[in-house]
Amino acid sequence: MGRRSTPEVNAGSMADIAFLLLIFFLVTTTIEKDKGIARQLPPKQDDVPEDVIIKQKNLFIVNVNRNDQLLVEEELMELKDLRQAAIDFIDNGGAPAGSPEHCNYCKGNRLPDSSDNPDKAVISVQNDRLTSYEMYIAVQNELVAAYNFLRNRESQRLYGWDFTEMKRAIDEGKITGSRKDDIQEKIKTIQGMIPLKLSEAEPKQAGS
């Protein structure tokens, strides 16, 4: 009696189905993109003064050491308290009434030994070279959040719309035409009232 041959399975159709499934998943799958911290470089200036003198009271110094400890104005601080401390500094409005530097929309404590107004307030951040990337990002996020809080407050007061929402609507192309120009002018106004002055010093060498 002869041996029966093993029946073959036609895999041609299965290959077609697998190819179609591959195309389906490639078309429908959304790939998440990692995003860094958004920063916009200032426009190039031809005539830049060589020596810019900043009053000590207008400088808010933030240091992060190799152990990810936060030192703000030479005092240890928890990360959760950094945002409010930055808000208090930027919004202090310490310049006396009647002076050119007086801030009439600031709601801070108006301490004479803290910043005169948001335009004069500068936050300087210095990290150790061994500072973790996670801590670096966290500190940056808290400081930018402080600026956004004040910008949203003034934008709501003047226009009834958060600054961050206006900017997002412009960036995502949701507003066009003459209304876009109007919103962009409002954004510039708020940025002028609360300018983001975040300076990053050169990282310190470990052990220095």
Image (tube, helix red, strand yellow):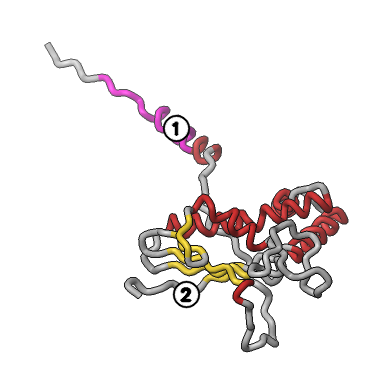
Magenta stretch: give its range.
Answer: 7-22
Say which of marks 1 and 2 sits in front. Answer: 2
| Residue highlighted by disc 2 | 202
Image position, residue 160 (x, y; %) = 82, 47
SS at circle 2: loop
Q: Residue at x 54, y 56 (%)?
A: 82
Density class for disc 2 (Cα within 10 Å; few <14, some 14-19, many ≥20) is few
| Residue highlighted by disc 1 | 16
Q: Nearer the viewer, residue 94 or 63?
A: 94
Q: Residue at x 66, y 65 (%)?
A: 196
Q: Nearer the viewer, residue 91 or 191?
A: 91
In reply to whether residue 17 is colored magenta, the answer given is yes
Q: Is residue 80 above or below residue 193?
A: above
In reply to whether residue 3 is colored magenta, the answer given is no
Residue 160 seen in the figure: yes
Image position, residue 198 (x, y; %) = 60, 67
Residue 173 seen in the figure: no
Q: Is residue 17 above or below residue 103?
A: above
Image position, residue 181 (x, y; %) = 84, 59
Q: Main secondary structure of the magenta part?
A: helix
Q: Quadrant of residue 132?
A: bottom left
SS at circle 1: helix
Q: Is residue 42 above or below residue 81?
A: below
